[in-house]
Image (spheres, rainbow, N blue to C red):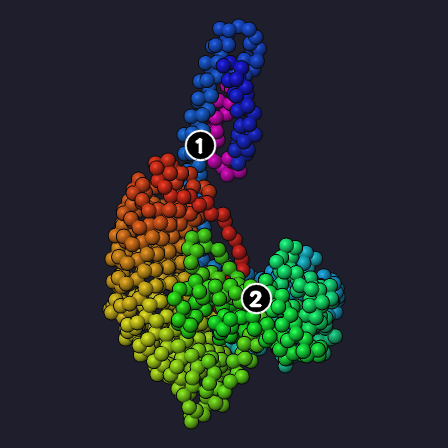
Amino acid sequence: MFKDLLEQLESTLQNSTPMIKEIEKLNQVLDLPKHETDTLIEMMRRGEHLVHKCSRVKWNCFKRYDYAKKIIKLDRSIDTFFRTYIPLQQTRDNRVIMVDLKEVHMMVKRLSGNDRTSWMFNQVGVAGACSAPDPPPVTPGLDVPLQELKLELFKDGRQVIVVSAPGGYGKTTLVKKLCKDDQVLGKFKDNIFFVTVSQTPNVKGIVQKVYQHKGYAVPEFQTDEDAINDLERLLKPIRPEAILLVLDDVWSGSESLLQKFKFQLPYYKILVTSRSVFPQFGSGYDLKPLNDEAARTLFRYSANLQDGNSYIPDENLVNKILRACKGCPLALTVVGGSLCGKHPAIWQKRVKEWTQDVSVFHSNKEILSCLERSLDALNNEVKECYMDLCSFPEDQRIPITALVDMWMELYELVDELFAIANLHELSNLNLANCVATRKYASDDSCYNDHFVMQHDLLRELAIYQSTLEPIKQRKRLIIDTSGNNFPEWWMDQKQHPLNASLLSISTDETFSSNWYDMEAPEVKVVVLNVRTKKYTLPKFLEKMDKLKVMIVTNYGFFPAELSNIQVFGALSNLKRIRLEHVSLPSLTTVRMKHLQNVSLVMCNVDQVVQNSTFHFSDAFPNLLEIDIDYCNDLIELPDGLCDIVSIKKLRITNCHKLSALPEGIGKLVNLQMLTLASCTDLSALPDTIGNLSNLNFLDISECLNIQELPERIGELCSLKTLCLKGCSMFELPSSILNLENLEVVKCDEETAYQWEYFQLGQAKFRIEVIQEDINLYWLHNPHL
């Protein structure tokens, strides 16, 4: 045994020495006690000395026997040290990290009480609202324009550069690539502000986003002039560093808007994208259509014409399509998507349709005509879903959960999966872009962090198609008002009842909530897009007896105060409500007997929660799902909510001030899913959670303050999935072994070993280690 033992000890010492030295260095950096590694270092020295002695032993059997016993003893000591002391040290170090994190969290909370920072932390948490989005992964034909545009940008003497081209030609994509270019980033660093302007520019909103991007408290401006003056004061201290302000999607007639943002600052540039040219600001940069090679590359990518594809079309067919699209990237992308995977006969049919008119597509109208024919690839239900996307404002993210609410009721879908499938089909055809702002590793069926973006030209196509029928016969009414200027047909009191099933009304920041009456008895879904700080729900909603879905979204910078909320109580068939970025008044008089789903996102809910006289179970006796996200004034869940025993799904996420759950939560005997992700102040789960015999899904991911699981968690006899991503290490109760139906535990690599111990105890669950997912796209929140 002597030779093998000696080689084993020598190998242990050689492999361990570098790590021990690094631990010593880290202990010095972290100012940890030096004596913690002294024991191990002493054992290593003894081992080194022993190896030196053993190497000189030749044929003396008695010495070999004696040294062999010493090697075995030392090896056991080292093994014992690593098996007992190191895990304890790791636990101690993790506790130190948790204490430090808690101190940081408390510091943020103290800052949130400061007048200058309270709004920032309560509404956002971090800066970066004007960061440039990433360009698409494939952008053929833009390398040369990128270099040319950089030369224009770096020229002295020109402050405003306008990139102009028809819609769908890739102006925004080009500018996104520019903002991510190494040379541009080297010059402008973190002083690149990317803002989408759209048809109705909001000067105050643009300036507020810049303030937020720089991490400052966001002021409330009375006038556009106040906002511009404050922006100049904000940018001046940045000198002498270069500043780039990108104004994307500026519409014709906005010369005065661009003039407002011009300041006498050195190294200050304004980059504009527009379908129009603005001669007063110089010649600008005219983005040309894609050349044949680039167009072919983009089309083949969009149609998935890769090697091994089931069908590679005749190149003549491809050439005809390229001629029809005339180098328009959006047309190439949508047409390619519509033909992807289709039978050759469909290719030939579509090409014949597209090439009947051989005129060159110089105008948006002609491009829209090309895109319109691509919709033939959709079945009727998916096409209707595509048309519904225009219910939301231009250039804004559309929550997938809002679309699911709409489509479940409009098209009487039996499962939410059908709505998601329709959305994926639109995405596959390049008629919409799906964006996941954060990938929750827990609930695969939760889409709170998933959104849809749509090109403004595709939105215009949907609106155009919606207006082809007479107003009385339209399936959807899309109304976009400026101030109190309503369409003439609405102001005509003699108008007969409308037949629409979907009503969308968008109002701007100057709207005074003075409504005209409306007769629309067939409406099932209402979408209200708001921008004012005070908003009165229209009284005509009370007459919509078939209304099933109400979506109110505030796109203004500050929460909108809702009034006349009692109209909800008059809607006898209302099943789903989604409110975003609004302040809710007391619900004393509201009763909704058929309400099933409630979603509150970034809402102020304090008046509802603090009303001790409100009886939730009487007001919402058939409620099935509650979803509360980013409601920062939610400190405690009201006890009365636990009297609604019909609830099956309860999601409370990113509510960082929620500190406790009521003991009465054990009364929710029908609860199947409980999600409490990222509620960082939540310190414990109540013991009564053991009463939830039907609970099959529990998620406490990122709940940093929870230090232990209740003993009664072992009574959750139906629990199948347990998610603890981002949780601190804590001692697990032995009752975990009683979870006979537990199938999967989702956790971090650092805590996985704790669960492996229970697997040794014959537990049958699977451990799924979740990798960190970081995606900063959520910073582009339209409301922030």
User: Amino acid under label 2?
Assistant: Leu
Q: Residue at x 31, y 44 (%)?
A: 740
User: Amino acid under label 1?
Assistant: Ile
What's drawn in magenta, residue-wise?
A: 27-49
Q: Judge whether residue 47 is colored magenta.
A: yes
In front: 533, or 689? 689
| Magenta span: chief secondary structure | helix
Name the spot of residue 509 as percent of width and height, x first: 49, 78
| Element carrying mark 2 | loop
| Element carrying mark 1 | helix
Residue 500, picture quadrant? bottom left
Q: Is any atom of residue 642 visible in this view? A: yes
State the separation of the CA atoms marked 1 and 2.
55 Å
Q: Against 58, is 254 above or below?
A: below
Q: Residue at x 65, y 68 (%)?
A: 332
Residue 198, picture quadrant? bottom right
Name the spot of residue 423 as percent of width and height, x first: 50, 66
**Residue at numbered disc 1:** 86
In front: 268, or 758? 758
Q: Judge whether residue 742 is colored magenta.
A: no
Q: Are marks 1 and 2 in contact (CB under 8 Å)?
A: no
Q: Which mark is residue 679?
A: none
**Residue at numbered disc 2:** 429
Name the spot of residue 696 as percent of width and height, x first: 34, 52
Residue 23 lies left or right of residue 359; in this view the side is left
In front: 104, or 48? 48
Q: Residue at x 65, y 72 (%)?
A: 351
